[in-house]
Amino acid sequence: MNSADNIENAVEQLHITTRPETDKRILDDAFAALEKSGQRQSFQVGRSARSKTLRIRIAELAAVAAVILVIFALFFSAPAAKGVTLKQVYEALGKVGNICVSRFDADEAEPYQQVWTSQTMNVMLIKGMREGQVEYVLWDVPNRLKRSKFVFSDLVSIDGISADMFGKVQKSITGTFGLVPFSDMNDAPEESQWNRVEDPNVSAIVPGTEVYELTWPQKSTAGTRIRFIKWRVFLDTVTNLPKRAEWYSKLKSEDKYKFSTFTVITYTSENQIRILIRDEFGSVALQPRDPGYIGTPPPY
Amino acid sequence: MLDDKHLITELKQGSKEALRQIYMEYKDTLLTIAASLLHDTYAAEDVLHDVFVSFAAGAGKLELRVSLRSYLISSVVNRVRDRFRKKKHYMVELDKAGQISSDSYNPEQSAVFAEHLQLLTDALFQIPLEQRETIILHLNAGMKFKEIARMQHIPINTVQGRYRYGLDKLRTILKRESKK
């Protein structure tokens, strides 16, 4: 088997057959999955009633949060020792129309998730892992459709977006892109601290930025343990927009924070997102909210 | 037997018979690809299992834009990659669990062929996954370089390079082994 031809022939002829017990196991499980998937469609109807109850509870919580809101608004409008306030960061993000957020584990060079959000097209494209495969999910709000496909496949699944999910997706698109720890800065705990990091070695990680840290204590679900969270953000010195954010945490008993994940932010254009969607999903009819935006360069 | 398009239509309506026909049609091809890439028939059977269960679970939402064969092969390759990524792969001799054979199997040559087959699968496992993937997909699954490039989102030249380098390495390994 020394010549390439012989190797090619041998590889061509490789053939492995399944065992009968394997066939039975796989078919039994696949049939069960097929049945379950049929039942799930009717199950969706029952879910809407439960989600309504959930929405009422969320509204109650929001009312409580509103009471606390006034106190924190005062806290966060006070500037740090010098430089940018947290409020200014939120304000800068409020002007962004199109963005790409890449999320990484601390020790990884490849992102575990990327999210492209276009407020001008009212869509959100998420690249992440599902069932061990890289998957793109396009939340197409104007058409009220969720399109998903695995990266190495052209097979696209299309689902309608439920009313409950529609609200959440819309909020994600119009909000702060999941970039900041609290979608509303007034939701931050009272003990939160916003400080500038003066160390030039830190800001040198992303040239042209100033670095700030927001730290706050967070109780475990059972309320028995307190964990301290640190959100370090690298802000563009001109626009005040985050270019990178790092997440750290530590227990009360620990001295040092542990670096867990980080986010890299790029301010892309509507056209770049449109091209990416076209490359992955083909010519999807996306309708910008305002036709005037077509071909118009976005602010960032 | 119905063609793939009709089978998918039937499957989307919940037909177990359609699912069974698809499984019977592609199971050996997919198992061979998975086993050749993983060098582990047990793990390859798990991959085949996961691919079909996932395929059945999402059947109601499937829209066929490529051939069913390409879709299933892509699913197998993705899951194999994931196994390597998670480093949960345990090497097992290829022919312990499954029934390994060859289309050109000849009883008179069985002993010689079995040895060659084992040498080949061992050698395949010594070359990088990307090259192994290209060789298996091109030669065993019968995919064109263009199809592989499209599936892997890489230029066709890269696919051809991987194929060529992979074959060279295979040849070197097999020469070395045959001298032992």
Image (tube, rainbow, N blue to C red):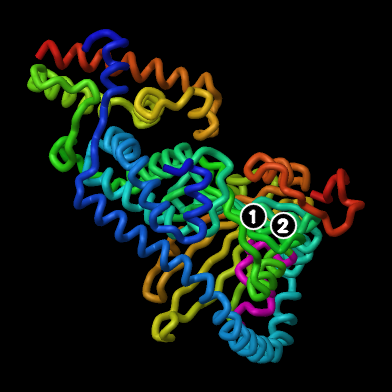
Which of the marked residues, 1 or 2, is nearer the chain's N terminus? 2
> What residue sits right under mark 2 in the picture?
A123
**Location of residue B121 (image quadrant):** top left
Residue A111 in the image: state x and y as whole percent.
52, 48
Residue beneath the point at 24% across and 35% down? A16
Q: Secondary structure at mark 1?
A: strand
Mark 1 belongs to chain = A
Residue A31 in the image: state x and y as whole percent.
36, 61
Q: Amino acid at mark 2?
A: Val
Viewer-proximal residue, A254 or A169?
A169
Q: Secondary structure at mark 2?
A: strand
Residue beneath the point at 54% across and 31% down? B150
| Placement of A220 over or under B51, stated as above or below | below
> Going by the image, does A136 lie left or right of B29?
right
- The lab-note entry on whether marks 1 and 2 share a chain reads yes
> What residue sits right under mark 1 in the picture?
A138
Number of on-image labels: 2
User: Of helix, strand and loop, which mostly describes the magenta segment?
Assistant: loop
Q: Residues within 10 Å of mark 1 (few under 14, many from 20)?
A: many
Residue B178 in the image: state x and y as whole percent.
14, 13
